Image (cartoon, rainbow, N blue to C red):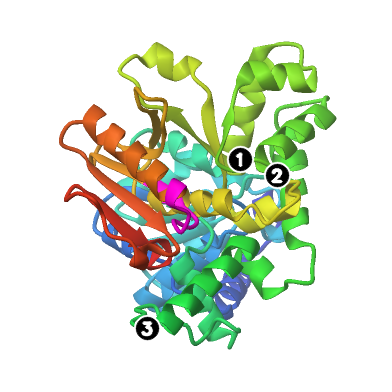
Amino acid sequence: MTENSWRAKWSQTQLQGILREQLNAFWQRPIGVKREQLATVLQYADAPHAVIVSGLRRAGKSTLLLQLAHTLGENAFYYVSFDDDRFLGFAADDADTLLNALVQAFGQRRIFIIDEVQNIEGWERFARRWMDQGYKLYITGSNAALLSRELGTRLTGRYLPVELLPFSFGEYLTWAQQQDHADATISTTPNTLVERALLNRALSTYLQVGGIPEALQYPNLPILRTLYDDVIYRDIATRHRIEAIRTLKELAFQVLSNPAGLVSFSKIKQQLGIGNVTTVKNYLQFLEDSWLIFTTYLYDASVKRQQIAPKKAYGIDTGLVNTVGFHTSPNSGHLLENVVFLALRRKTTNIHYALTPSGYEIDFYLPDQRLLVQVAQQLTNPQTYAREIRALQDGLAMFKGAKGLLLSTDAEHFDAPQDDIQICSVSEWLL
């Protein structure tokens, strides 16, 4: 140990004081909207694995662990935030000193809640050792230095991932209720025409503002623009040493301006004048790795055809899409499909789109559930209704034994033409 080491900076008394300050500040923070993923985190409580909470910046990862903490009780866990400037210089070899201070300050506890672990090089070494000693670890990390998707790979099979997306529609309505927002009194189980209309109105608002908690809380501040710039510049350009930042931004702008749109590597290459398809593919992967977008593949028996076919891209948050992308109209239909995708993503990662032999596009096919999903903003136009039903009928003929689901804002006015197709209100389905 040198005189400049982290351990030399602090006496045990000082270190215990820092840890008490951190825990007190963490415990006193607003607990926020109860997240749906809290149930998953609690479900993993008895497993010996570390729980890795990952997701976009400002999606609420630390708040989720605060909600976990309040279910455990203030005296049940150790809390450490490596984002504290007093931990500058902390190295993996200092972990025993840290654990000693925690035990002296709080006594014996068996649970760790750790924020911003990526700031410590080699953190996985002491994490594995603590797990071997019987400690339970809950970990978050921001994307600044190490993508949260990659945190778990350091533990090689000894972790359980929890993906946290921005607020769902249900969580948005809960937030509105807590804030006494205009949508606070909306019924989530509508029985009358007026109640259904109000619920659809709330959904329209949600499509525009999205579900980033901080952006909802401070709508007059440029939260979403700042978040987007942080991801582009810090998480992607800096991390991957990209010099052609303008090209990266143009590609991101194009994708986010066309939510639920088809993405062709070769077309983007031509449109943006990018040197080769590999660069386009890499840039899109960077956008996905940093949680700005998701992509789905065409469902096909041939893996090669899946890889060659255009992908469909969806934004992580419709509020972010509206802030960053270019739209000459509200674009509600594609935003609605984007929100449905995010709802499906909360349940499964195995999501595709499909093309029928007659050339109809199926918005979503979930192979595990054998479910075909179509999304239409409204079915009032007879041609729209006929097209969506025909697409599902073609899809059902293609995928034997599957079921069809048609989601729309005015579904209550329409009956399904056959037993294996269901027509549902999209706002009620989202809840």
Instruction: Give the magenta-colored segment's residue range.
Output: 374-383
Residue that mark 3 sits on: 192
Q: Residue at x 54, y 63 (%)?
A: 62
Closer mark to the observer between disc 2 and disc 3: 3
Q: For the N terminus, which image quadrant?
A: top right
375 versus 125 height, above or below: below
Corner quadrant of residue 170:
bottom left
Q: Mark 1 and mark 2 in contact? Answer it, CB < 8 Å.
A: yes
Between 193 and 29, the one lying in front of the other is 193
Closer mark to the observer between disc 3 and disc 1: 3
Q: Residue at x 31, y 57 (%)?
A: 423
What is the spatial separation of the Cα atoms under label 1 and label 2, in whole angstroms?
7 Å
Q: Earlier in the sequence, mark 3 or mark 1?
A: 3
Residue 260: % across, % down: 55, 41
What is the spatial separation of the Cα atoms under label 3 and label 1, in whole angstroms?
42 Å
Residue that mark 1 sits on: 290
Q: Is residue 345 visible?
A: no
Q: Mark 3 and mark 1 in contact? Answer it, CB < 8 Å.
A: no
Q: Earlier in the sequence, mark 2 or mark 3?
A: 3
What is the spatial separation of the Cα atoms under label 2 and label 3, in whole angstroms?
43 Å
Residue 262: % across, % down: 56, 31
Q: Mark 2 and mark 3 in contact? Answer it, CB < 8 Å.
A: no
Dot 1, how many residues are within 10 Å of its Cα: few (below 14), some (14-19), or many (20+)?
many
Q: Residue at x 35, y 51 (%)?
A: 406
Residue that mark 2 sits on: 231
Q: Is residue 58 visible?
A: yes
Between 134 and 208, the one lying in front of the other is 208
Is residue 417 magenta-colored?
Answer: no
